Every structure is written in C-alpha cells, then in structure tokens.
Image (cartoon, rainbow, N blue to C red):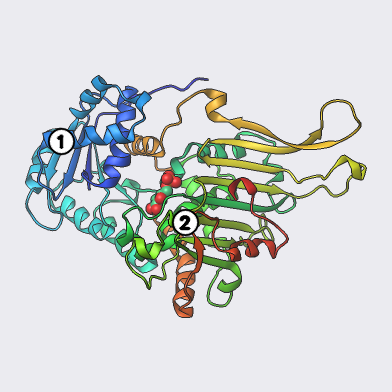
Amino acid sequence: MSSRIIAVAPFDLVIFGGAGDLAFRKILPALYQRHRDGQIPPVSRVIGVSRRAMGDERYRAAAREALGRYVGEADRDAAVVETFLKRLHFLSIDAEADAGWDDLARLLKPDRERIRAFYLAVSPELYGIIAAKLGAMGLVRSDTRVIMEKPIGHDLRSAMAVNDAVGRVFDESQIYRIDHYLGKETVQNLMALRFGNALFEPLWNDAHVDHVQITVAESIGVEGRGGYYERAGALRDMVQNHLLQLLCLVAMEPPTYMDADCVRDEKLKVLRALKPIDASNAAGAIVRGQYRAGAKAVFPAYTQEVNNADSKTETFIALKAEISNWRWAGVPFYIRTGKRMPVRVSEIVINFRAIPHSIFAVGAGAIEANQLVLRLQPDEGVMLWLMIKDPGPGGMRLRYVPLDMSFAEAFGARSPDAYERLILDVIRGNQTLFMRRDEVEAAWQWIDPIAEAWQQSGEAPKPYPAGTWGPSAAVALIERDGRTWHEDGG
Ligand code: BG6
C-alpha cells in the first residue's frame, strides 16, 4: 500500500522558544514539510513566542532563512515556502513576567474549533512557570496539549518537580514528552519487524540472542551548546533518553495493541528490570570518555570548546546493561554513544548465537553468527546477515552476506524527519511515541546511581582523540566478554 496523506484537524501551535535553535532547525522545517504535503489545513497557525522583540514580518524572514538552510533543496519550493510563512505569527513574551500574555490570549481566544498545542522548546526551568501562566490565563482547555522537549530534569528529583509543576495544569493525557528518536523511521520499523512478522519473535530471547549492541555515534562536537552540555554530559543528554528508549523497544514484551498505554506499559517494565549500576559495579560496567584535540588538531579538545580546562564532563559513554527478566537474563546490551566519533552512525545490532555444530569442512570458511542490523542513520535500513554458499563451481565455500533492505533504494521515498511525525501525532492526539511520566522517572532512577558513583569517585573521563571511536577501555569493555563492537559502527 502506498503512503497516504491524511490532513489533520485545524490547530494553533504556539512555540515557546519560537526564535530558538530547535524551532528554526527542526520544528519549522518539519511543519513546512507537512504543509508542503497538504497535511495541514489552511486555517492552522504557528505562533512563535520568545522574549525577543520582533514582529510577524521579521519572524517570517528569519524562518525563510532557516528553511533555506535546513530544508533540502529538492523539497524547497519558493511559492510553497511563502504560503507556509503566512501561517507564522510572532509574539514577544517574557515567560517570567506579565508582558505579552494578553496578546497571546487575544490571538488564541476567538477560535474554539481549533486544537491548541503549546510547544515548550525553552529551558526546562521554565516549563512549570509557563504552564502555570497558561492555566491562570484560562488558555488550557481539556483538549489542549503541551509538548515538552528533553531534558526533563537533571535527576529524578528535578524531573519529578518539572512533572509536578506541569501536571498541576495539564492532565497526563495532555502531555507529550518528546524523545525524537522514537519518531525515526527505522525505530518504527523495529516495531513493524518484530510484531508484523512471525519469524523473529520466537528467536527474540536469551536462547537465540547472544547480545545486543546499540551505537549512537555523532561526528559533531558540542556545537555551541557548551553551557547546557557541561551540566548534562553524554549520560544525561543521550543515554537517559534516546539510548534507553531504543533499548526498551528492542527488549519489551509484545504490547497487546499498538496504543499509547500498551506500548508504554511494556517499555516501563524493561526500565524497571534494568540491573542497577552503582558505585559497587560502575567501574566494570561503564567507560566514560572525553575528546581531546584530534590528529593534526583539526578539531579542538572538548575543554577548549567549552572553555573549561578542568571539565570532567563525559562526551562518550560505553556501558554494559543487563535486564533481569526471563527473556533477557544473561544477554548483555552493550551501549555506546559519543561526540566527535569518526562517522555519524546510529544502529541497533541483534547478534544471534553461533550455530551449535558445523557440518562443513574447515576449508569451507568460517561461519559467522547471524546479525540483524537496524540502521537508524544515515542510510536507514535493515540488514540481515546470513551465511550462504559462495555462488558458482568450486565446491562448498561459505560466504557471509547481508539481505539488504535499504529503504531509500527499496521504496524511493523521502524519509520524513522524526519531528514531522511527532508534531502531527500531537495534533492527532496519539501519545504512543511520547514518554509517559513514569517512564521518564524510571529512567532517571536507573541513571542517578551511575552519576552519583562518578561523583563519588571523582575520576576524570578517559581521553580520546577527536575523530576516533572513544577510549581503548571501551573496546576492552566488550572484548573482556569475548565480543567485539560491530564494525560498521566501529
Ligand atoms: C539531542 C541531543 O537530543 O540529540 C544532541 O541533545 C544530539 O546532543 C542529538 O546531537 C542527536 O540527534 P540526531 O537525530 O541528530 O541523531
């Protein structure tokens, strides 16, 4: 069946942080793409809000420039860009003061027919303040939605405080906590593959899977976000959310239905089954790294980028997670993520067990264990690595080959950015790909003891040259168990 574009109901989307990096880089380009496909009804409006003083026209000019930069040339059509820009409005509001709120109320009030969504793309300290103000102004109706960007808190306590504050105004059914990894095409495909085929599920357990690897490697550094990153580090920036969410989708039990609570209930069980890592075992289970200047100093060191020679913030993590339940006990999940790696690659690799006995002569060649590789980016696709007979005459020689399903090639379709799907899911009222409060808090519950263990030890992260795969200890972490990192990813 080819893809169908179904228009969503008319909406007003108010973006707090509307003139910020995320809005220009991701949110507006995503909305433009959906507009271009005719999925957004003509009356829908996008209202950028920020402390800055600028009118609609200046905002539209800034958005035009951003679309020029962040939307691929093939997708940019000058006339369509102009019709999209007409949807944009701008209001100057200081979240912590009173000015500007009446203007927002005036702009929103007249129309009760539209779905109303508030996107909080600002610092999380402001989430509660903005929610309270929206409540006090009477702008929150029972069908109003709020979208929260990560990070939600810095640890369990602060996450609970943010959730409490927003929860005083919005019901959980109105709250959409974004983890944009859940909107990625291959992540969706993981679910299609697992639950749309009878083939994999019987093998999806400790009897047939040797181990799982999840790699999210980035070639970029901290890109001017040093202030935030210094407080977060790779643990809070990537592991607490994106990597744990991927792990949950691989490891969860089949949900009864593909609906929000069924899926989130299953993910939550995985988070709660994660074996704790704390001061007693962190040294053997986790490697932290920080990039130094690269070879020939092409890239500066992290400490130079953030202008803090003493920084102990990690820009790389490799860890071995274990899930204490019947399906996964004894199957390690090796996770790694880092900035300034040699390439940008995100992938999940399911490594199946080796065959129990070979019937082939030694000369037939080595028999590799099967691997299912789900590549999230770049070149999204799924590959199943199998042994086959080397074609042609010459006796039985074996060859390890991928059954390749690269989506771009197979379907020739542009793969939508995660934000396109997620923002429209908010309008559609579908929370399946958003994190529920208890999930976020369970993730922090697992992360906090790790962060505490590091703080207690006072140890600095291990250095690695920018443009490499992290400290050698990360290789040792997996090789100690007689395994190696998947080579496409390292
Ligand atoms: C964000 C992190 O959530 O994800 C960034 O804060 C990171 O540090 C980004 O660069 C990676 O997202 P993607 O989609 O480019 O892999």
Q: Earlier in the sequence, mark 1 or mark 2?
A: 1
Instruction: Look at the image and tell me whether residue 436 can be seen.
Output: no
Q: Is mark 1 within 8 Å of ligand 1?
A: no
Q: Which residue is mark 1?
A: 89
Q: How many marks do you count on the picture?
A: 2
Q: Position of residue 35 (x, y in %)?
A: 30, 26
**In the shown orientation, is residue 219 left or right of residue 164?**
right
Q: Residue at x 43, y 21 (%)?
A: 4
Q: Position of residue 336 (x, y in %)?
A: 54, 56
Instruction: Look at the image and tell me whether residue 340 can be seen.
Output: yes
Q: Describe the element under mark 1 as helix, strand or loop.
A: strand
Q: Are marks 1 and 2 in contact (CB under 8 Å)?
A: no
Residue farthest front in this picture: 296
Q: What amino acid type should be assigned to the residue bearing mark 2?
A: Lys
The label shown at residue 477 is: none
**In the shown orientation, is residue 66 left or right of residue 484?**
left
Residue 395 sits above or below residue 486 on the image = above
Q: Quadrant of residue 478?
A: bottom right
Q: Which residue is mark 2?
A: 296
Q: Describe the element under mark 2 as helix, strand or loop.
A: helix
Q: Position of residue 254 (x, y in %)?
A: 59, 44
Q: Residue at x 32, y 56 (%)?
A: 225
Q: What amino acid type should be assigned to the residue bearing mark 1?
A: His
Q: CA distance from mark 1 to mark 2?
A: 47 Å
